[in-house]
Image: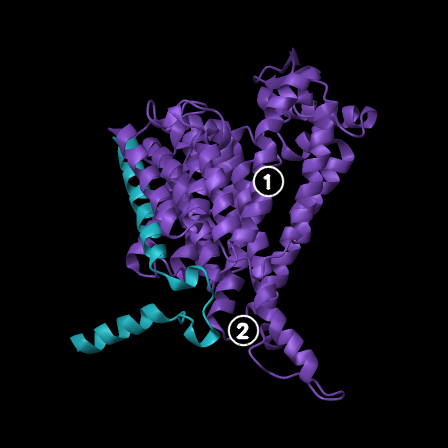
Amino acid sequence: MLDLFLTGFVALILLMGLRKPFIWVLAFLYVDIVAPQKISYALLTNVQLSLVVFFLAVVGWLFFDNKQGARVSGRQVLMLLLLIYCYFTTQSADFPVEAADKWSWVWKSLVWAMFLPLALRTQLRIEAAALVMVLSAAALILDGALKTMAGGGGYGTLKLFINDNNGLYEGSTISCVAIAIIPLALWLARDGTIFPANSRTRLFAYGLAFAGLLIPIGTEARTGLLCAGLLAVLMMRAVKYRWLYVGGLALAAVLVQPLLPNSFSNRMGTIQNNQSDQSAATRLAVWKWTINYATEHPFGGGFDAFRGNKLEIITSEDDGFGSNSTKIIDQGRAFHSAYFEMLGEQGWPGLALWLTLQISGLIQLEGVRRRLRKSDAPSDRRYADLALALQQGHFVYLLGAAFVGIAFQPFVYMLIALQIALVQQVRRKTAPVAVAQRRMQVPGEKPLAAHAPAAAN
Amino acid sequence: MIDYFSIALTHGLLVLVCLRLLTRADLDRDPAPEEEVPLEAEPEKKAKWRVRRA
């Protein structure tokens, strides 16, 4: 039944693409996030769904779409450089087979992120892509949250549709992403035009935000709790009544405490007391190893270079009678951090490229927000709010990435593509006005106060 | 059961998104500034409703 439903759904969406080829772009976003071919057990598993939809999306854009105003941005060039660099490190990787395996999905993720902004060239397309990404992720988030409420959570035991530990189906990754998309979901409910702002859209968005907050509880991923904390702080910047917001947060924290499962509270307690926690001690040992490794291999060891590590971990626990130390020998432990993943796998140049890609996005979004926030034009206000939502989500990702190896997580690259599309859209919209102003400006006179967001600020 | 509910709700909404996009001309071309949908559409509706009730 589920199989038939998913197959019918995919077929319907692909058919709609015949009328508007842009729908195929949205279809790929859905397929890449939800991976219906994994949930399905017969029909969809027999076709290379991801490849077919990717092909349709690119062909649809190439042959049937208007490319007016599409231009390549600096961040797309950065991704291209990162892609080329990763290709070369894969050729000389410490573990060629494993590196080739990771490369097989990393290049697709980067190529898609480079392509996507070219297709997102109108306001509605940006909104549609954001909405499809949020709804696709919502399938997993709602599933996880409802199972958590029904008591099916637990570290490494929360099952989202299928038993899979890849992509968004991995506990720590979905915890980080579920929190990171909350601002985007709230933006869609407030400024959306596909589902205009009303009580139903608000109810869904608030429900999804609540479900997103339940995911770290269900997966017992400490990263998720830190991400939720950061988002709470970041949102203070945008709320109207700060004291009311802080009071509401404090009240919610007090009310929710007794309802949390014991296993969750115990695991979150290890954030402070990481000396006794093997997972935290292993992370610190891996990170130390990575720094030493990067000193010897400044250009990185290629994908999955962590497989070469051998660690000596000492954990200490105070049992009331004294401190008990335990020595553990471990090897081939994953980086557990996107920053160290980049450093170990791609070396210092790779880390620098990746950091530039991340930080430049934050700066550009801040620029868009400041430029448009006081504008009177409705679309400008929407763009400013979207820039803030994407920026908050990206800050959350960058914090989560400190503890999870998600440097090449495809969903995050889709968010980056959305950021690029937004910045490009704002540039396109303001460029003609700026040019007109330059042409009509008489030396010594003030610029024209036309519909120019830059002038409004 | 939870799986079915999550899939049905989100996939139903995804179909609705695509259906709505099929009828939108601004999917392929941005509207001119004067054609833009105002941000305060919802409060206006509420205000009308309140007037009618009064």
Q: Position of residue A401 (x, y in %)?
A: 60, 37
**Sequence-first tag of 1 and 2:** 1
Q: Residues within 10 Å of mark 2 (few under 14, many from 20)?
A: some
Q: Amino acid at mark 2?
A: Ser
**Residue A381, image x, y percentages:** 50, 67
For chain A, give the colour: purple
Residue occupied by mark 2:
A375
Type of colouring = by chain
Task: State the hue of chain B.
Answer: cyan
A441 or A202: nearer the viewer: A441
Q: Name the one closer to the observer, A441 or A141.
A: A441
Q: Quadrant of residue A103?
A: top right
Query: Position of A363 compared to A374: left or right?
Result: right
Q: Is residue A433 above or below residue A270?
A: below
Residue A408 visible (yes or no): no
Look at mark 1 in the image and give the residue it sits on.
A111
For the point 61% across and 73% down, which residue is it?
A432
**Badge 1 vs badge 2, beta-carbon distance below 8 Å:** no
